[in-house]
Image (cartoon, rainbow, N blue to C red):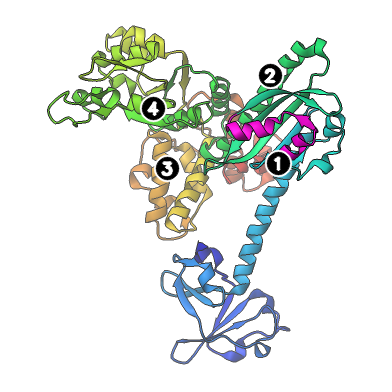
């Protein structure tokens, strides 16, 4: 197992040149240190004394060790029986790694894994008990792993007596016939059948195989609905379909929520509303126009739409229409047949539209697409087919097209720079991503996200002062989220200390005239009233505290109770901290 030395490093060390100064168990500062590092008169590391179990004189000191840098990657399997001395950048000793640190690390990892497994167990139990239908989970060979308590009613056998038995044996012994799980394993696809049980029940069973990364079936999930009453068969079938759709929707919702946590960082109400709307359209094949200034995250939103759609297993292809010369973009989009022009590949080349078949194609800066190619794109949207450059045969594709732009396409239509028919064909769902200056409450959480990202990337532990974040919230961010990310990366790699302050800001940012330097309210754009109120109150209270010197004076100035000042400051500081 490979891990960075700084992750395991125990920094609770005492460095001394005098053996008599190593604390005993009875010493007051004994518990402050886990190791004592003894240097000799030549300033060389002599011995290391573990302090966490016995007095140093009762524990054999260690004089053999290995040096590593805090940025080094170490293989735990190779050094479990070794003591490691970790050095910092100025080459000073900053910590120790021994078997104790390995044990603590592994214990922490095991606790995390156990916590996740317990949560999965809880969720699974809740799912199994939430329906009157019989829910069964089998492994890839057909042995039952879990089965809900409805088995006693439908099979005449308690669920605990069925766990571990194979569906082929149960089918052979007459428990039921046929086995939907067996068929799903043999056919490697979802199957729905009518099943008869030994106690005379008729079940409608749907079995769905779940494939692992190796392409083999890991689990089979079957849902059985009792349809014994023939008079209610049609009604039961309709309910089964709705039930399966509900399960599918719930699973999709869980997947979306997991993706939200990992891919998208936001807190503002307007971004939340946008993502809720995108979830509603995720299951349909409509085209989407994503509007927004440069750097607001249009590509991130496009990937989000793709990942929560039914095309998530297909490719996600992006092309910037403004970055490719006009004489090349047609071949990039539509591909070409062999021998189409001088310098072409002998075998021809597929275009990005063809490569995106079964997935999603993002056309960024769609306003830069030449008028001559807009006709061909319109055909792809309407007919799902196109002709390659130099070809005569049509190529059919199944692709969802999302476009992004920072221009006003409607004005371009009026000016004759964009085809009207293509505009209305694309403009089925239009999403406008607000600039960062209009969602100020996102700045602190984005700042934290990027700071963690680049600390991990470059191996730093830098922190940002509250004043810097407040300054960020006053800055207009013409480059939006991309500019914020670039500024934070620059601060992480160029600042000297671990505390990022106003003095570390780039001069062009610090001296920018677009910064609102007033000490009062700095809301200059429309935003949800709740967010504007929070920001205005925070700045007013902060200024009153600065001028009055105490919460009592601030309360008198603002005409409220002192307890109100304390409560609101604690609440609004969460936006910064």
Comparing marks 1 and 3, which lies closer to the viewer?
3
The kind of secondary structure element at disc 1 is helix
Q: Which of marks 3 and 2 is nearer the N terminus?
A: 2
Comparing marks 3 and 2, which lies closer to the viewer?
2
CA distance for labels 3 and 2: 46 Å
Categorize mark 3 by other alpha carbons within 10 Å: few (<14), some (14-19), many (20+): many
Tag on residue 356? 4
CA distance for labels 1 and 4: 54 Å
CA distance for labels 2 and 4: 31 Å
**Residue 171 within the magenta-colored segment of the rendering:** yes
The kind of secondary structure element at disc 2 is helix
Comparing marks 4 and 3, which lies closer to the viewer?
4
Q: Quickly name the residue at label 2.
A: 241
Categorize mark 4 by other alpha carbons within 10 Å: few (<14), some (14-19), many (20+): many
* Percent of width and height locating residue 248: 64, 27
Q: Earlier in the sequence, mark 1 or mark 3?
A: 3
Name which residue lies at 62% across and 88% down. Answer: 60
């Amino acid at each position: 197992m490979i891990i960075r030395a700084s992750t395991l490093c125990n920094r609770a060390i005492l460095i001394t040149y005098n053996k008599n100064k190593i604390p005993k168990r009875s010493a007051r500062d004994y518990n402050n240190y886990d190791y004592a590092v003894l240097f000799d008169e030549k300033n060389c590391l002599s011995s290391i004394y573990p302090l966490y179990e016995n007095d140093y004189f009762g524990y054999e000191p260690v004089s053999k060790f290995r040096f590593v840098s805090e940025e080094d990657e170490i293989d735990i399997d190779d050094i479990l029986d070794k003591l490691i001395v970790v050095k910092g950048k100025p080459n000073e000793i900053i910590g120790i790694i021994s078997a104790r640190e390995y044990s603590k690390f592994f214990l922490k990892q095991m606790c995390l894994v156990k916590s996740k497994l317990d949560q999965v167990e809880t969720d699974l139990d809740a799912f199994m008990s939430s329906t009157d239908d019989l829910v069964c989970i089998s492994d890839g060979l057909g042995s039952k792993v879990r089965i809900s308590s409805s088995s006693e009613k439908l099979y005449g056998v308690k669920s605990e007596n069925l766990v571990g038995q194979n569906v082929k044996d149960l089918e052979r012994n007459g428990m039921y016939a046929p086995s939907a799980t067996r068929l799903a394993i043999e056919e490697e696809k979802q199957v729905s059948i009518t099943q008869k049980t030994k106690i005379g029940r008729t079940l409608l069973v749907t079995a769905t195989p779940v494939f692992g990364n190796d392409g083999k079936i890991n689990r089979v999930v079957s849902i059985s609905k009792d349809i014994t009453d023939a008079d209610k068969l049609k009604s039961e079938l309709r309910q089964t379909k709705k039930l399966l759709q509900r399960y599918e929707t719930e699973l999709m919702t869980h997947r979306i929520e997991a993706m939200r946590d990992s891919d998208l960082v936001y807190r503002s109400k307007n971004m939340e509303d946008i993502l809720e709307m995108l979830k509603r359209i995720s299951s349909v094949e409509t085209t989407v126009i994503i509007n927004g200034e440069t750097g607001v995250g249009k590509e991130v939103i496009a990937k989000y739409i793709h990942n929560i759609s039914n095309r998530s297993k297909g490719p996600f292809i992006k092309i910037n229409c403004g970055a490719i010369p006009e004489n090349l973009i047609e071949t990039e989009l539509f591909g070409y047949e062999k021998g189409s022009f001088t310098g072409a590949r002998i075998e021809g080349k597929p275009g990005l539209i063809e490569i995106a078949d079964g997935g999603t194609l993002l056309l960024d800066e769609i306003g830069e697409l030449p008028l001559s190619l807009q006709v061909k794109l319109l055909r792809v949207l309407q007919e799902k087919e196109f002709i390659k450059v130099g070809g005569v045969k049509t190529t059919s594709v199944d692709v969802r097209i999302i476009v992004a732009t920072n221009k006003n396409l409607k004005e371009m239509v009026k000016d004759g720079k964009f085809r009207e028919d293509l505009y209305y064909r694309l403009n089925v769902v239009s999403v406008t991503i607000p600039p960062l200056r209009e969602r100020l409450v996102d700045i602190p959480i984005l700042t934290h996200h990027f700071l963690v990202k680049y600390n991990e990337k470059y191996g730093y532990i830098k922190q940002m002062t509250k004043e810097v974040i407040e300054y960020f919230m006053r800055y207009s961010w013409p480059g939006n989220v991309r500019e914020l990310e670039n500024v934070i990366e620059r601060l992480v790699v160029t600042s000297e200390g671990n505390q990022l302050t106003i003095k570390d800001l780039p001069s062009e940012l610090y001296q920018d005239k677009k910064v609102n330097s007033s000490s009062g309210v700095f809301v200059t754009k429309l935003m949800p009233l709740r967010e504007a109120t929070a920001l205005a109150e925070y700045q007013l209270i902060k200024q009153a505290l600065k001028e009055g010197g105490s919460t009592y004076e601030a309360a008198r100035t603002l005409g409220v109770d002192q307890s109100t000042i304390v409560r609101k400051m604690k609440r609004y500081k969460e936006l910064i901290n």
